Image: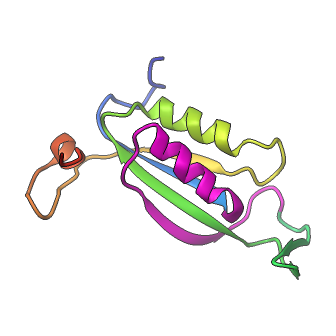
Amino acid sequence: APLPAGLDSGMHKVSIIVQLAKFETLKKALNDIGVTGMTVTQVMGCGLQKGSGEKYRGAEVDATLLPKVKVEVVVSKIPVEKIIDTATKTLYTGHIGDGKIFVYNVAKVVKVRTGEQDYAALQDVE
């Protein structure tokens, strides 16, 4: 499938905001399609569900900000659409709070240890 307008064919960062309960499933699904590196951050966020009370670990929490996980991967070889399709299929329940996926162009990548740049910096060492 062709890339959407505005996405070149180079390197991209895909940032996926996901519920804590779905993180392990997403991580495995991404590993299964060849993603070997990711950055994972615990974040707080809100979307359409804001204002409704929700239970988190048994306690009622202010749902304006809920605990989430942000999973970031930078890819060059694996097509962005494959990442999006995999994440969407893995995370979809049809309910509010399924998450969001953001895609950014990446201008430069430098591997500190070797000085390799861009495509080369993202390749796994055999």
Queried whether the magenta region covers residue 21, the answer comes back as yes
Q: From which residue to which does the magenta span run?
A: 20-49
Tell which of 82 and 6 is nearer to you. 82
In the displayed structure, does residue 109 sit left or right of residue 55?
left
Report which quarter residue 57 is drawn in.
bottom right
Name of the residue lying farthest toward the front: 126
The quarter of the picture where the C terminus appears is top left
In the displayed structure, does residue 15 sit left or right of residue 54?
left
Q: Residue visible at 42% across and 31% down?
A: 6
Name of the residue lying farthest toward the top: 1
In the displayed structure, does residue 30 sit left or right of residue 122?
right
Residue 119, above or below 7: below
Q: Residue visible at 22% across and 52% down?
A: 109
Residue 103 visible in the picture: no
Name of the residue lying farthest toward the left: 115
Q: Residue visible at 65% across and 42% down?
A: 90
Q: Position of residue 87 (x, y in %)?
A: 59, 42
Q: Position of residue 76 (x, y in %)?
A: 30, 37
Report which quarter residue 60 is drawn in.
bottom right
Q: Residue visible at 58% across and 32% down?
A: 85
Q: Position of residue 119 (x, y in %)?
A: 20, 40
Q: Position of residue 82 (x, y in %)?
A: 49, 31
Queried whether the magenta region covers residue 12, the answer comes back as no
Instruction: Count numbered badges in the picture.
Output: 0
Tell which of 33 and 107 is nearer to you. 33
Tell which of 55 and 101 is nearer to you. 55
Residue 68, above or below 120: below
Q: How is the image coloured?
A: rainbow
Residue 109 visible in the picture: yes
